[in-house]
Image (spheres, rainbow, N blue to C red):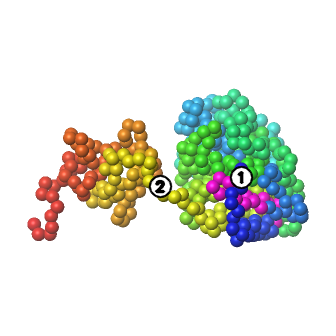
Amino acid sequence: MTTSEVLLPTTRRALLHRIATAQAEGRTPSLVAAVQRDGRLAWSGARSCVDGHEPDGDTQFRIGSLTKTFTAVLVMRLRDEGLLYLDDPLQKHLPGVDVGQVTVFQLLGHSGGLAAETPAPWWERTPGETRPGLADVLGEQPLIHPSGHGHHYSNPGYTLLGALVERVRGASWADVLRREILEPLGMDRTTPHAHAPHAGAWAVHPWADVMLPEPVEDLGLMAPAGQLWSTTTDLLRFAEFLVQGDDRVLSASSVAEMRTPAAPAEAGDWASTYGLGLQCVRRGERTLLGHSGSLPGFLATLWFSVEDDVAAVVLTNATSGPQVGGVAADLVQIVAEAEPRIPAPWRPLPDVDRELLALTGLWYWGTHVYGLRLLADRGLELHPLRGAGRTARFRARPDGTWTGLNGYYAGETLRVVRAEDGRVDHLDLGSFAFTREPYGASESIPGGVDEDGWRGLAL
């Protein structure tokens, strides 16, 4: 990872002030943060309670539930290879695991209805050997909500996904993770167990400035939900992958699928949803994606904004205190607003397709007026010209039709319908007829068009 042009002094000062405030007010032994812009390291900084011992981009911290995003990528790879479908019931691949008809998709998006935690004792502070089998992870009542009816975060759900990966691959979750994600992306400082240099795990007393070491347990079967250690350098590399994709690991279209909300928001929380292994939050007008994580002694957050192409990581070694999710979001906002992304120069298309060019311009759905624009790679964009309406972008198919990419028309087909003489009669979009004139005299308009045509008040 190379360093981009230096940020403005005022931006650097604002970033440093934000993490310094977080470390001081959050009373954490150490805190390290880094910001990436346009795929390159833009800034990094750290604070520590011991002078001269600040962590850096090579210092490992435990990242807790950020591990879930890695597990989700492994599952998506299985889907892309045709080894499973996301709508498969888990029992199809893990027979004997009694979770009803919970699907792989529901487990990825935490809508399977499983309990949030394992049965006692507290799994994050007990050795993995405490739960040697999946039945010990799930307990006697693994399902506490109807499957598919809403979002309910579940750590055991990701243990099941890790077991799914192991069953299909015939290898341990850790080995599959290293071979299929960490090595291709060059993330050699992301490991299941700590490797020096790494931070120690600490709890800070809520009412006094004193500290207590926290136990660091091997989580056993719960590892796919929260085992990993990583660094700011590695996690920014992972963030770039989650924006761009990497065909050695997962395609751009599949990581985009992971970023798409998979379950409705919890009641009263309309600013936060969950994709497939990724949290999705709205902060003002900005959408942030990534994941938070915590284990005794550690807090972690990775946020990135696709539109701004800015990512931020914040890692600390305290059980509680600094609100690292808010700090990481602030770091993204500081850079994105102080030094907004410079758009690429406008350039014309490399060549002209006369037939496609003839489709552009005004189209009418009934009396609603729309404009149709030609985009790169034979894509199209349909947008309302007056009042509210459904804007949509379309990707060209080899058969001469287009597939909707967003909004109401996502997945719907747009096709050109021609008259017997070959001229374009209308556009068909999910059965809606778009004509060149409002209610143009076309046989394809359901109900027909009054033969007397348009009229004024005097009859």
> Element at badge 1?
loop
31 drawn magenta: yes
Can residue 308 be seen from the camera position used here? yes
Residue segment shown in magenta: 27-45
Name the kind of residue labelled 2 in the image: Arg
x and y, in percent, of residue 218 in the image:
81, 42
* Label 2 environment density (alpha carbons within 10 Å; few <14, some 14–19, many ≥20): few
> Element at badge 2?
loop
Q: Are discs 2 and 1 less than 8 Å apart at CB?
A: no
x and y, in percent, of residue 258 in the image:
58, 46
* Label 1 environment density (alpha carbons within 10 Å; few <14, some 14–19, many ≥20): few
Figure label count: 2
Write down the quadrant of residue 207 in the picture: bottom right
Along the viewing direction, whichever of 295 and 115 lies nearer the viewer: 295
Write down the quadrant of residue 269 in the picture: bottom right
Closer to the eye: label 2 or 1: 2
x and y, in percent, of residue 401 in the image:
37, 42
Name the kind of residue labelled 1 in the image: Thr
157 drawn magenta: no
Q: Residue at x 86, y 53 (%)?
A: 200
Q: Residue at x 21, y 40 (%)?
A: 420
Along the viewing direction, whichever of 452 and 140 lies nearer the viewer: 452
Q: Give the residue pinned by disc 2.
A: 347
